[in-house]
Amino acid sequence: MKKIIVALVLFTGIASANSDIWNKLIKRNRIDYYPGIIKSLTSQGLYHTSVPYLKEYLVSSGNVKNQNFDLLVDEVVEKVGDRQFVLLPEKYLNTSNAPTIKYILAKKLLRKRRLGDARTILTSSIEKEHSMRPFATHLLGMIYSFEKKYEKSISEFNKCISLSTSALSDDSSKLRQRQLKINRDYCRAGIARSLYAAGKYSQAELAYLDIDKSSTIWPELLFEEAWNSYYKGDYNRTLGKLVTYRSPVLKYIFNPEIDVLNALSFYKLCLYDDASKIIEEYYKKYESETRGLGRILGRRKSDLKYYFRIAASYTQGKKSDSNIINSLLDSVLKDPAFLNLFDSYKRGKEEIDIIKRVSDRRLRKVLTTNLKDSLNLQQKLIGSYVKRTFKIAHSHLSKSFAGMSYLKLEILSRRKDRLYSGVQDFGKRGDIAYLQRSQKQYFWNFNGEFWADELGDYVFALKSECN
């Protein structure tokens, strides 16, 4: 990271350098000027360009207690995202009292499962009025859930919903509005997840239904709802939830475990032909593709730029030769976390044109170097996220094959028992008598198509053929 210090003044709307101050600062190399430099850069929309200065100020200035600097941190992190700062060592994040930095530190500690330390920071360092409070409350809810303190977690998630909703009425940017909506919906999901983890499946079912279908995160929650119905013993509703993934609007979802849960639900109803068909289709669809994905991960172990490039190319319509890679990228490109990372990168690239208009050659060179540092790291963050998605998918595929193989053997055993017992398959399939519904669910006539208001509301009407 460059340790050359630059003072900026505004001239005709474009940042330019004052030669006298420039020469003095090169000689003095004073860290004290960093907040002023960052402020000048952000005033011109150079948020990514300011990141190296902000990081170096945290690393070099010792104990940072400056309210104006705290406001600068808030502004930069909102525009750039927090992942560039999560990579900083804890000792440097600890030097700042900025609530946003404290939130980032707590997030880092949470990933390390240092729950107590993260909870202490979140409860003592971020005021109720601060813009990061809704996000901090979300983390607190997660921590209590991990600790199996489900009543406390639900209480925090309810606070998070209220805080996020209230903040939406403020005069904040479109970016922050989107972040708050996603945060609110994840807190609603957190309530359902806590109830599910506590074994309160009926309450969890109702909580999941409170999440609007227009939410960015709703498609991923359908799978959780399906598992919730499965543990309730309502296999028909599990099948109904999962059939929604056949809708064209959800074509981008990649989750091989959907097929496993489908087969398992048919198995629980003793509908062995249906379960066997799903298993056979799963092997045809994924067996060779899984080996191919494994080879890519093996060859590209540490090449984060490769994963960045294939994702960036995919956003421009360039597809891979691998069907499974294309399916994974379809899924990644809808992921809110990926979208935040990639949108931040695109906004960073827009800073190139601003820097080109800086008249002082020395200043332009330093700013260009800073921006390249930030954008290169952002590329690695995006590549790391894509690689992690691929690794998780490969792991799930491998586990799903193991589950399908076990289920296949169980079905053979059950069919053998049925043959020896002389039990015959049942005749007519499907009857409204086998449906279960809560006060938030209703009957809907299925006409063979998927409509937005029908998605997620399907339920099968199959009678169990178990003895």
Image (spheres, helix red, strand yellow):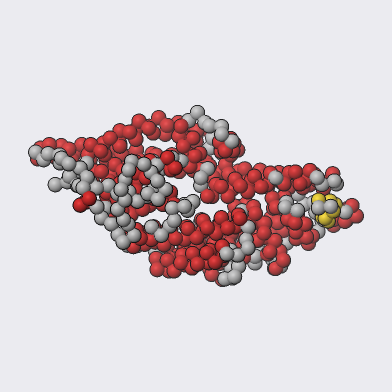
Q: Is residue 277 above or below residue 258?
A: above
Kindly identify the residue that appears in the image at 17 percent across and 44 percent down: 465
Residue 68: tell me if it is visible: yes
Q: Is residue 21 above or below residue 421?
A: below
Q: Is residue 438 above or below residue 318?
A: below
The location of residue 92, given as percent across then percent down, is 65, 59
Kindly identify the residue that appears in the image at 57 percent across and 41 percent down: 383
**Residue 239 left/right relative to 101:** left
The location of residue 414, given as percent across then percent down, is 18, 40
**Residue 437 left/right relative to 336:** left
Q: Is residue 46 above or below residue 276?
A: below
Residue closest to the eye, 308 or 426: 426
Quadrant of residue 122 in the image? bottom right
The location of residue 15, given as percent across then percent down, is 81, 52
Residue 409: tell me if it is visible: no
The location of residue 190, given as percent across then percent down, is 43, 60
